[in-house]
């Protein structure tokens, strides 16, 4: 012992927290982010109940309960830590519910949730490892298993006379009838629970962009893509829907704000996000115009999900200072 | 006011309000000081004293060893108690000289018995400036503590066209550069001109983040009639004060990986360094004090202080009223790049910029989850790296891939860890991988 130590009084507090820098951290955590997204979906939930009746709440509850339950069950079978409250499974359930048609069968909803979490997420190793958006995997399964029920629409409350229970996209596809943009924006048209009101979706989406959870590049590139590709088809043949109709119809905006922007299944590079968003819109326009189904947001997002690892690889940002060096 | 900046970065809460309005206080001379022989990057200084020797305040007690080194001076008058390994704030023990002060008067003011001659800044030659800066033991007042005389002696083939004074102070909490700008603007400008003279440069820029409008205004007025000097307002964003980021914002040029600022014609100096250079030449003072901010919610009385080098952290904390019960962490340096302390006997060194006592609420550690592939770290990395990948490669021991992905370019600024919602200690992993890769590279060249 040197003389130093004897000179300093021993009444010292001992500090055990020696974690290395940085010592500050943003206030976000995985579960806070998940619950925040859930909160951003509240306007859409309210819109769903307003236009399709309070019964819809049961679809939402069923989807959430089964999603969380499935996750917990699989985690405990695998002897992993059960993450009841991280919000991730609850969010998947909620997102799935909002893609379903009003008055959808509760038992089918439950199956959808089980598939979404089981096949969409846990089979890949759980949170962070899945390739495809779990909610859309669940929804795609239901589409295949219950093709009739899932396209059975109800006439919304407060519907204007001209509106039928058919969704604007189905009306266009099968009857060549175009719905006005205004009711599509408000939501008093036929459609899935969450996609019906564009305004409600935008309120939540813009909130997420503002706090930085949603990277604006994805929704913006999807919209730009829609103007480019939708516009092209419209220009060639005005019988085709206009870009504006494309954007407000179906689940385009819901997909752009809440589905394509799912962190795990979208690119991590800024450039990649542009490619991803543009790609979704291109695939979507083709499906909507040439495909057998009226709607294609779900498939186009799932399709592009599959390319994300590739996109990430080829859009690696250039390291600071490197380009300049080569130019010399 | 338009403000320049770089791509990426984050906006941590600043906490500057704790100390920004507080003028520097001169710290009373401590009973005893601990002087590590290596307070700078480069070779450890060689001790000139032995146990039992009497030293004066300002006396050189260890001399520079070779070109990239710096001498150490005693900040008190007293007796050498020992020369041996002591704990430092870097986390590692280093060879140090312990000096016990003569007399016991608490508030004996800082004296500098061993003054050097004063020099006329108008007539001094570049070589004289370098010589004096080396003699005064001046080192960069930023994190790395690079000997300043070396920075003022660029190789002949490098053309330097701008000197940038780093007034960003982008680390949260720290306010000492701000206080220097507010309290000693003329000395700072004098220091800048001396740096320019030493380098033969005509353009001098003071870069200040726009969260310090008073400093921008004050200095802009001061240099109004000065030829070649300008004040540039920079966006408040971490890490605006990193050398590469600052050069990019001011000149638009990017320093390539593995290169130095002087490769793009820029030299960066800290505010504190410019002041120290002014003091060394105009007042004949050697560097025996450190200007630092003591802050954080865990310290009773936050302060900006001029502390004798060698004062222990514990002494400084006691002077500031001690810690609160909910304090959990003590950091030397800024909160983004500083080092957590376990032994408060470690001394304040020449380049120490802050001592922070943080509470649980401030460190806010959230549980770690798997990577969500959100891309936040990728978008925020100012050097355009992919932190999530680099960390992953380190975890998997894939050091070749890590090297290919540019892990050695990382400056460990902490931006990625700060922003990660999954709370993955990215920098920790990257640091580990970087060390491994650098070691690999060394072995390769050795072959
Ligand atoms: S610590 Fe390294 S990887 Fe992380 S943001 Fe800073 S430079 Fe990029
Ligand atoms: S910020 Fe964290 S969670 Fe997001 S991609 Fe980077 S490492 Fe993964």
Image (spheres, helix red, strand yellow):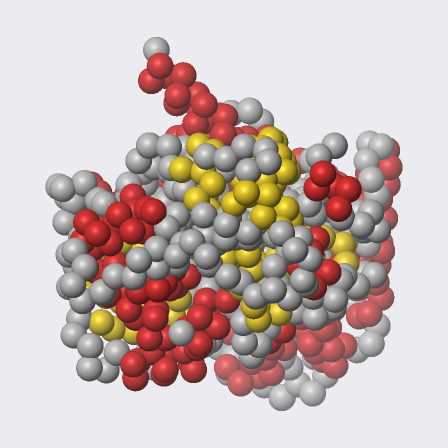
Q: Is residue A273 above or below residue A125?
A: below
> Residue drawn 72% across and 83% down?
A157
User: In the image, A76: left or right of A235?
Assistant: right
Residue extending farthest to the top is: B447
Residue B5 drawn above or below residue A162: above
Of A30 and B146, nearer the camera is B146
Compared to residue B357, the image places residue A188 above or below, namely below
Relative image position of residue A246 (x, y in whole percent): 46, 69
Q: Position of residue B409 (x, y in %)?
A: 39, 40
Instruction: Tell me: A77 left or right of A116.
Output: right
Of residues B25 and A314, which is closer to you in this image?
B25
Residue at the spot 19% in from the left edge and 82% down from the top edge: B225
| Residue placed most toward the observer, A311 or B37 | B37
Q: Mark yes or no: residue B102 visible.
A: yes
Q: Residue at x 22, y 65 (%)?
A: B120
Q: Could you tell me which quadrant the C terminus of chain A lies in?
A: top left
* x, y percent for residue B248: 30, 58
Does the image show residue B151? no
Along the line of sight, the residue nearer the viewer: A95 or B111: B111
Q: Is residue B404 left or right of residue A150?
A: left
Question: Residue placed at 39% from the left, 21% from the top?
Answer: B442
The part of the image, by quadrant, that contains residue B241 is bottom left
Q: Quadrant of the N terminus of chain A?
A: top right
The percent position of residue A185, horizontal first and vertical second, equals 56, 80
Q: For the image shown, how many numbered marks are present on the structure?
A: 0
């Amino acid at each position: 012992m040197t003389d130093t130590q004897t000179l300093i009084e021993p009444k010292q507090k001992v500090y055990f927290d020696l974690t290395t820098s940085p010592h500050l951290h943003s206030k976000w955590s995985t579960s806070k982010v998940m619950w925040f997204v859930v909160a951003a979906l509240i306007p859409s939930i309210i819109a769903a109940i307003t236009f399709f009746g309070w019964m819809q709440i049961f679809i939402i509850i069923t989807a959430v309960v089964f999603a969380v339950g499935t996750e917990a069950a699989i985690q405990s079978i695998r002897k992993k830590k059960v993450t009841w409250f991280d919000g991730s499974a609850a969010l998947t359930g909620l997102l799935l519910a909002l893609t379903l048609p009003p008055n959808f069968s509760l038992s089918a909803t439950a199956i959808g949730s089980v598939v979404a979490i089981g096949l969409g997420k846990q089979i890949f190793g759980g949170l962070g490892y899945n390739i495809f958006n779990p909610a859309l995997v669940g929804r795609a399964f239901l589409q295949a298993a219950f093709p009739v029920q899932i396209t059975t629409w109800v006439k919304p409350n407060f519907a204007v006379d001209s509106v039928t229970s058919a969704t604007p996209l189905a009306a266009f596809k099968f009857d060549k009838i175009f719905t006005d943009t205004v009711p599509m924006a408000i939501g008093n048209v036929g459609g899935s629970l969450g996609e019906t009101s564009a305004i409600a979706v935008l309120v939540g989406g813009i909130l997420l962009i503002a706090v930085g959870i949603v990277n604006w590049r994805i929704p913006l590139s999807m919209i730009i893509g829609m103007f480019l590709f939708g516009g092209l088809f419209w220009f060639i043949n005005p019988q085709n829907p206009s870009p504006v109709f494309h954007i407000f119809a179906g689940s385009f905006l819901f997909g752009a704000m809440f589905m394509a922007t799912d962190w795990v299944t979208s690119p991590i590079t800024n450039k990649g996000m542009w490619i991803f968003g543009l790609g979704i819109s291109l695939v979507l326009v083709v499906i909507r115009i040439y495909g057998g189904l009226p709607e294609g947001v779900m498939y186009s997002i799932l399709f592009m999900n599959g390319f994300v690892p590739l996109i990430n690889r080829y859009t690696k940002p250039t390291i600071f200072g490197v380009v300049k060096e080569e130019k010399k | 006011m338009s403000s320049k900046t770089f791509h990426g970065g984050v906006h941590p809460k600043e906490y500057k309000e704790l100390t920004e309005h507080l003028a520097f206080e001169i710290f009373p001379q401590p009973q005893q000081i601990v002087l590590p022989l290596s307070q700078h990057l480069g070779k450890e200084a060689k001790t000139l004293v032995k146990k039992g020797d009497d030293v004066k305040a300002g006396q050189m007690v260890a001399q520079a060893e070779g070109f990239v080194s710096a001498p150490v001076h005693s900040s008190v008058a007293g007796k050498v108690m020992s020369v041996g390994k002591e704990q430092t704030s870097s986390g590692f023990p280093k060879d140090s000289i312990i000096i016990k002060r003569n007399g016991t008067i608490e508030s004996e003011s800082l004296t500098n018995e061993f003054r050097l001659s004063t020099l006329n800044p108008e007539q001094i030659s570049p070589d004289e400036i370098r010589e004096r800066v080396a003699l005064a033991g001046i080192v960069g007042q930023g994190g790395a503590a690079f000997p300043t005389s070396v920075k003022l002696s660029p190789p002949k083939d490098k053309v330097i066209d701008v000197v940038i004074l780093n007034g960003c102070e982008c680390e949260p909490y720290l306010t000492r550069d701000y206080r220097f700008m507010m309290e000693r603007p003329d000395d700072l400008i004098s220091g800048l001109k001396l740096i320019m003279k030493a380098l033969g440069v005509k353009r001098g820029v003071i870069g200040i983040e726009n969260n310090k409008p008073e400093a921008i205004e004050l200095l802009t007025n001061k240099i109004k009639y000065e030829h070649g000097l300008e004040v540039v307002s920079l966006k408040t964003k971490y890490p605006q004060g990193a050398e590469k980021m600052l050069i990019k914002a001011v000149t638009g040029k990017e320093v390539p990986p593995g290169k130095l600022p002087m490769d793009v014609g820029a030299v960066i100096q800290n505010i504190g360094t410019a002041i120290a250079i002014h003091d060394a030449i105009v007042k004949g003072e050697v560097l025996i004090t450190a200007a630092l901010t003591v802050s954080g919610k865990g310290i009773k009385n936050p302060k900006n202080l001029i502390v004798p080098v060698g004062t222990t952290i514990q002494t400084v904390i006691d002077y500031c009223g001690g810690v609160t019960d909910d304090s959990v962490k003590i950091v030397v340096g800024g909160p983004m790049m500083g080092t957590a302390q376990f032994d408060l006997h470690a001394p304040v060194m020449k380049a120490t910029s802050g001592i922070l006592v943080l509470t649980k609420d401030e460190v806010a550690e959230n549980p770690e989850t798997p990577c969500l592939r959100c891309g936040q770290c990728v978008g925020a990395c100012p050097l355009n790296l992919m932190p999530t990948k680099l960390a992953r490669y380190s975890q998997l021991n894939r050091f070749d891939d890590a090297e290919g992905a540019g892990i050695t370019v990382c400056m460990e600024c902490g931006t990625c860890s700060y922003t990660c919602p999954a709370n993955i200690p990215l920098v920790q992993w990257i640091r580990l991988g970087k060390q491994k890769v650098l070691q690999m590279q060394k072995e390769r060249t050795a072959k």
